[in-house]
Image: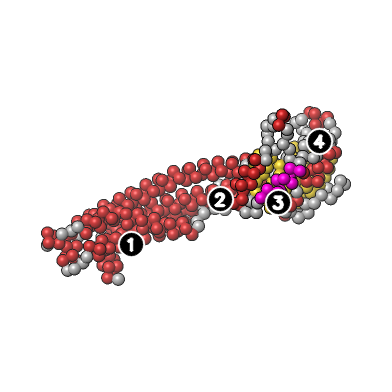
């Protein structure tokens, strides 16, 4: 307690210089915490909203290039059984693309707005267990086809297409039960499809999901199989199989077994997310290095400030040594003063970073127009960031005070007095 009381007295003697040291540490810590939190927040948006990934799932596809002499590797029911038997696989879900083009021409009321529009549609059938959605069972040939759309597609529609064209913004709950016609086997861009057989069906939206294709509608597997059979397309093989692992750490071994069996792992979405995440990490790393440079400058400032203080207090230190103060006590006094500066700088820097993040988020909400995947916050502040801010402030201050503390220990009281 006496050491802390003496350190506080010494800090008050040069209050202006010590406040400047606190400001230097706080500036470096604020920049460091701000950019690290920004990188974490943007990375979280990329992983959870733009490219959502299931850590327990991987998608298997047939090889893009197959050598005829070695036989073809297809995804049929037999192959799905083998893949589902790989150790660590909990479930195997089949996917089948509707192998003909399709169009939808809608002319009517769309949530209070008259809408007349035609567009090309891609359709894919999946096992209902993959999407875990209510009212997503095939009800037979004459019934409407249940359909799901991607949560990301709805976001793009609301924040881009609808806003630019004055259309109503909708939610997944609002879309449930919405019906629209689909002409399978027809296309606006493929002449052969336009001249061939087509089959008009009515689709009804069952809602939205993160586990469906982005660029089209997802329908029950049996509905896709029936459409392919009716229009003379392959209804036996699957376009992909999603394997659900029992635990995420089984994914590498399952992927290796899939490749050994002659199939490929479709990780295009995962690779794209990793590329975007790597770009975010690189930019964050560069800004973090600049922040560390500011922290280093604050460390140098503390070293210079305490070095000058040690020289000015040489007589005082000599008196302390002559009355019995040990080298450890003298070094502890200097380091305690530096620790107080580092603690204050870390706390102020963390608070400043948090305040800066709140300001940026407010400006983004009030000044930036709405755009797809716009987050509520661009920052993430886990608990360890606050602890790290205080620890970094303490480390910077103590490192800066090491040389002055060693110099104070070496003061010869007999020569000074």
Q: Secondary structure at mark 2?
A: helix
Q: Residue, x 26% and y 52% (percent of image)? A: 304
Q: In the rendered image, which residue does mark 4 sit on?
A: 233
Q: Identify the residue under disc 1.
A: 340
Q: Residues within 10 Å of mark 4 (few under 14, many from 20)?
A: some
Provide the residue designation for mark 3. 91
Q: Indicate the position of residue 354 as horizontal and vertical percent values.
A: 46, 56
Residue 85 included in the magenta stretch of the image: yes
Observer-nearest of 106 and 176: 176
- Colour option used: secondary structure
- Label 4 residue SS: loop
Which residue lies under the disc numbered 2? 44
Q: Residues within 10 Å of mark 2 (few under 14, many from 20)?
A: some
Foreground disc of the pair 4, 1 = 4
Q: Residue at x 72, y 29 (%)?
A: 68
Question: Mark 2 or mark 1, which is nearer the start of the sequence?
Answer: 2
Q: What quarter of the picture does the N terminus occupy?
A: bottom left
- Cα separation, mark 4 vs mark 1, equals 76 Å
Q: Give the left or right position of residue 264, taking residue 398 as reference.
A: right
Q: Is residue 312 left or right of residue 174?
A: left
Residue at the (83%, 48%) spot, across then down: 144
Image quadrant for the C terminus? bottom left
Report the span colored magenta. 78-87
For marks 1 and 2, give the CA distance: 35 Å
Q: Is residue 365 left or right of residue 100?
A: left
User: What is the total number of numbered labels drawn onto the structure image?
Assistant: 4
Q: Earlier in the sequence, mark 1 or mark 3?
A: 3
């Amino acid at each position: 307690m006496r050491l802390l009381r003496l350190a506080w007295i010494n800090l008050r003697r040069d209050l202006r210089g010590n406040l400047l040291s606190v400001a230097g540490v706080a500036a470096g810590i604020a920049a460091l915490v701000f950019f690290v939190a920004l990188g974490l927040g943007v990375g979280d948006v990329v992983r959870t909203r733009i490219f959502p990934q299931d850590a327990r799932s991987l998608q298997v596809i047939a090889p893009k290039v197959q050598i005829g002499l070695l036989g073809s590797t297809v995804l049929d029911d037999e192959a799905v059984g083998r893949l589902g038997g790989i150790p660590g696989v909990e479930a195997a879900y089949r996917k089948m693309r509707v192998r003909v083009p399709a169009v939808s021409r809608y002319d009517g009321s769309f949530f209070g707005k008259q809408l007349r529009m035609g567009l090309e549609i891609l359709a894919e059938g999946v096992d209902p267990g993959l999407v875990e959605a209510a009212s997503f069972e095939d009800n037979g040939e004459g019934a409407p086809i249940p359909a799901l759309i991607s949560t990301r597609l709805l976001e793009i529609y609301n924040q881009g297409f609808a806003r630019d064209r004055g259309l109503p913004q909708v939610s997944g709950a609002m879309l449930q039960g919405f019906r629209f016609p689909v002409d399978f086997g027809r296309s606006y861009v493929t002449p052969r499809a336009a001249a061939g057989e087509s089959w008009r069906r009515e689709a009804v939206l069952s809602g939205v999901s993160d586990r469906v294709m982005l660029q089209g509608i997802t329908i029950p597997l049996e509905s896709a199989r029936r459409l392919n059979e009716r229009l003379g397309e392959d209804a036996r093989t699957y376009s992909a199989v999603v394997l659900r692992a029992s635990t995420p750490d089984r994914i590498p071994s399952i992927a290796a077994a899939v490749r050994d069996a002659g199939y490929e792992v479709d990780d295009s979405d995962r690779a794209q997310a990793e590329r975007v995440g790597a770009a975010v990490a690189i930019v964050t790393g560069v800004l973090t290095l600049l922040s560390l440079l500011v922290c280093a400058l604050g460390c140098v400032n503390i070293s210079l400030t305490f070095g000058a203080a040690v020289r000015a207090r040489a007589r005082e230190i000599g008196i302390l040594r002559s009355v019995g103060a040990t080298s450890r006590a003298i070094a502890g006094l200097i380091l305690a003063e530096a620790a107080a500066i580092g603690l204050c700088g870390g706390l102020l820097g963390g608070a400043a970073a948090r305040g800066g993040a709140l300001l940026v988020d407010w400006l983004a909400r009030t000044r930036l127009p709405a755009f797809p995947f716009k987050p509520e916050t661009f920052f993430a502040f886990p608990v360890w960031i606050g602890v790290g801010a205080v620890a970094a402030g303490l480390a910077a201050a103590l490192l800066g005070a090491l040389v002055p503390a060693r110099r104070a220990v070496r003061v010869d009281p007999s020569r000074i007095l």
